Each structure stands twice: as structure tokens, then as C-alpha cells.
Image (spheres, rainbow, N blue to C red):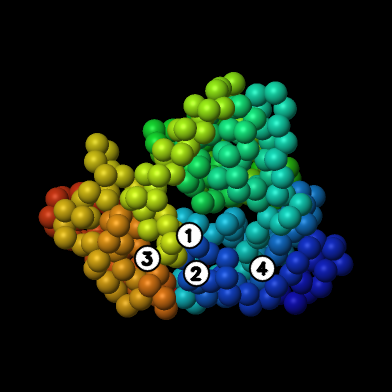
Amino acid sequence: MQQLIEELKRADIGELLPNEPMSKYTTWKIGGPADLLIIPRGKRELAAAVALLHRYGVPWTKLGRGSNMLVLDKGIRGVVIRPGPGLDYARFDGHTVTAGAAFSFIKLSVLAGKHGLTGLEFAGGIPGSVGGAVYMNAGAHGSDVSRIFKSAEIVTENGEIVRFDREAMRFGYRHSILHTMPGIVVEATFELAPGDRKEIAAAMAAYKERRQRTQPLQAPTAGSVFRNPPGDYAARLIEAAGLKGYRSGGAAVSDIHANFIVNTGQAKAEDVLTLMEHIQRTVKARFGVELVPEVLVVGER
């Protein structure tokens, strides 16, 4: 690893942080250390870093804004790559917007509305990055990334930058090709439509009011923990199983929204996993439904 770090330094990739606690970078505020966190300055540096890691045979994990992710207590072996400030931008051109992987998906939805463009209203409450949203095919309120996606530049596992169109992304429910193919989004372009600024603002305000009423926005969470099963809602099943408020160590099922797990202060990843497994067993026993996690679990248990 030291030889790799020296070569990364010589290549002037960006920030290199050995043994960096991931709890500083996840919305759950949970997670052990990564052997090395790399924050590349821009697109070229990110591609160069991945190429070097490929040459050294060192595994790597991508990290955006740390939502929708549970990093286990022993941390992540190998390297974690987090897009840096050079990928935190958005450019509007007519009805399209191109944004860097590090740009806030919520901020992008707000800017689109101010430009009089409709299509991104659903993103107003998704607390991730553009890169993470594309990776997960993030969605809400009956829409998702696949409906507005035009193309993305992706760094493949050998460090090559390749442009993917919508078909190549193989989007599904909270799924993209990046779940099975190693790669990291560096930039994405979305196709929007002209709309009425007042109507867009009203829709986003209504969504925001609903979130404030129905989600534990002030507590450390990762968003929805389980995927909605076909024709039903995970939150309804968890609540019907009597699990609102159920605790394991420092982790608790939210009293406000049953598909959110809250870090009440000192939760460990093990507390969250134990709670998730209890929820799955209970819902399966009561209703015969297998709840599938939506959060990505990474690292060593």
C-alpha cells in the first residue's frame, strides 16, 4: 500500500487520507476506517487513480455523499474513492443539464426549477450526489433517474472514461449496470422539459412539506432502508409488525417513518445490521414477505 501511496502522490491525484474513519462521510455517521481514502481533484485525476489501482490489483469502493450506505465497523479494506470539488458543478444548456458526480442531487433539482425546467422535482428530497443517484437509479414520487437520464461519463475498472447512454445503463428499480460492472460516474447529463416556475416550486414545496411531516429529517439516517415490495410499502409492513421504536443498541426504527433506522447517538453498524435482520425475520413471519435492503452494505463485519 505504501508504494501505491507514493505513486499516487507523484501523480498529484488529490487528497490521500490513510486509515480514514468512514463515519465522517456517511449520513448515518457510522463506519470504521478505510485503508486509504482518495479524493481526486477532477475527472482526469480520478481516472488516473483508478488506472493505478487496477495496475496494483488493489480493490476500491466508490463513495458519494454517504447516504444509502452502511459501512461496517471494521471498515473497508483497500481504497475508497470520493469525487472531489472538481466534480462539484452543474451546467445548463437549453433543456439539458450536465452535472459532476459530486454535485448535490437536491441542489440540482432546485436549480432546474429556477431555470424553469421540469423533471427533477422528485429529487428534492434525495440526499445524495449526482453520481450516487445515477448508480442507484434514485427515485421518489413515482419518478426516477432513468426517466430523465440522457448519458453519463463513467470511469471503468481499468481507468478508461466511457460515455454510457440510457440503454447501456440497464436501469431497473433502484438498480443500474454499475451494481454488476465496476465503474464510477464522473459526470451525468439529464434531459428536462420546459415548465412553469410557479408550478414546479409548488410541487417541490408540497413534497418538502410531506417529507418534514413523515420523515425523521433531523436524525442521522441513510434514507429508506428496505425496497418497497411489489404492490406494497416496506414502511407499512414494518409498522404493521409493531416495530416502530424497536431498538438494537444505539439503532432504532424511527417513530415517524418505519422504513428509516435512526442512529440515536452511538450506534454501531452491528446494531443496524442486527435491527435490519430482526425486521426481515419479523415481517417474513407475519406477512410472508421478504424485505430486500435498499442500503448498500460495505466493509468488514
For label 4, count other residues whose C-alpha is less than 10 Å away and answer few (under 14), some (14-19) or many (20+).
many
Q: Say what amino acid the circle numbered 1 marks.
A: Met
| The C terminus, quarter of image | bottom left
Residue at figure coordinates x 50%, y 42% from the top left? 124
Tag 3 residue = 262
Instruction: Report helix, strand or loop for mark 4.
Output: strand
For label 1, count other residues whose C-alpha is less than 10 Å away and answer few (under 14), some (14-19) or many (20+).
many
**Disc nearer the start of the sequence (3/4):** 4
- Please provide percent x and percent y for residue 190: 61, 31
Marks 3 & 4, CB-CB < 8 Å contact: no
Marks 4 & 1, CB-CB < 8 Å contact: no
Q: Is residue 130 left or right of residue 267?
A: right
Q: Is residue 131 left or right of residue 279?
A: right
Q: Say what amino acid the circle numbered 4 marks.
A: Leu
Instruction: Determine which of the numbered discs, if any, sits on residue 69 in the image.
Output: 1
**Disc nearer the start of the sequence (3/2):** 2
Q: How many marks?
A: 4
- Spot the residue most to the left: 286
**Disc nearer the start of the sequence (1/2):** 2
34 or 87: nearer the viewer:
87
Q: Say what amino acid the circle numbered 2 marks.
A: Lys
Tag 2 residue = 29
- Please provide percent x and percent y for residue 176: 50, 41
What's the CA distance linking mark 3 and mark 1? 13 Å
Figure quadrant of residue 117: top right
